[in-house]
Amino acid sequence: MPFQLPELPYAADALAPHISAETLKFHHGKHHKKYVDTLNELIDGTEWADKRLETIVRKAPRGPLFNNAGQHWNHSFYWQCMSPKGGGDPVGKLADRLRHDFGDFNALRKEFDSAAEQIFGSGWAWLVRESSGAFKIHTTANAENPLLQAAIPLLTCDMWEHAYYIDYHNAKEKYREAFWNVVSWDFVAAQL
Ligand code: FE2
């Protein structure tokens, strides 16, 4: 079975005004779709055709196959990190664990934002659980993701220009503020 573009877990206009329907239509319907289509072309008739996406991400040599597989994985994860019911602070066990490792949520957000700001060029900011059990902020370049460092991804923010340019132009900080307004802590909690 070729890979499929997953449906957005909400309507295209559901995250507005934080993330507009226009952004989601381009980002999901054009950019993500192109990664999936290219991935399917690249694996067709090769040893990769029957492999799981995670296997391709972990094992493919750096190049077009890895890039399109990584971007398919990253975007599929990213859509779920946002929700029209999102925003606010985490609660319950997740909140206790994050407080333990970051002090408070403002400190977490500040560290995440600062790491995201320092990405030069295209990349992703992540909240991960490292193999030691510690919660950490990571960043990755281009199509890379924390699976390559044996860390469990819990949350990601797409810091490629196509994620924010329609809504916020060069004001990346406004995009990140918007992201926190729709962040799905329920999804993060479900990854633990
Ligand atoms: Fe993207």
Image: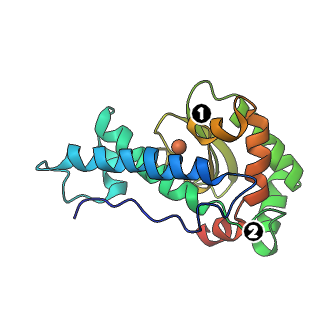
- The amino acid beneath tag 1 is Glu
Ligand 1 neighbours mark 1 (CB distance < 8 Å): no
Examine the rendered structure and indicate whether residue 111 appears above or below residue 1: above
Q: Secondary structure at mark 2?
A: helix
Q: Which residue is found at the position 73% from the left and 51% from the top?
A: 179
Locate residue 119: give its quadrant: top right
Count of marks, rendered view:
2
Asked if 83 appears above or below 137 in the picture, the reply is below
User: Do labels 1 and 2 touch, CB within 8 Å?
Assistant: no
Local crowd at mark 2 within 10 Å, few (<14), some, or many (≥20)?
A: some
**Residue at the disc numbered 1:** 161
Image quadrant where residue 97 sits: bottom right
Q: Nearer the viewer, residue 29 or 191?
A: 29
Q: Which of labels 1 and 2 is toward the front?
A: 1
Work out how far the residue at label 1 is from the one at label 2, CA to CA, in angstroms. 30 Å
Where residue 123 sits in the image (x, y, percent)? 56, 35
Which residue is identified by label 2? Answer: 94
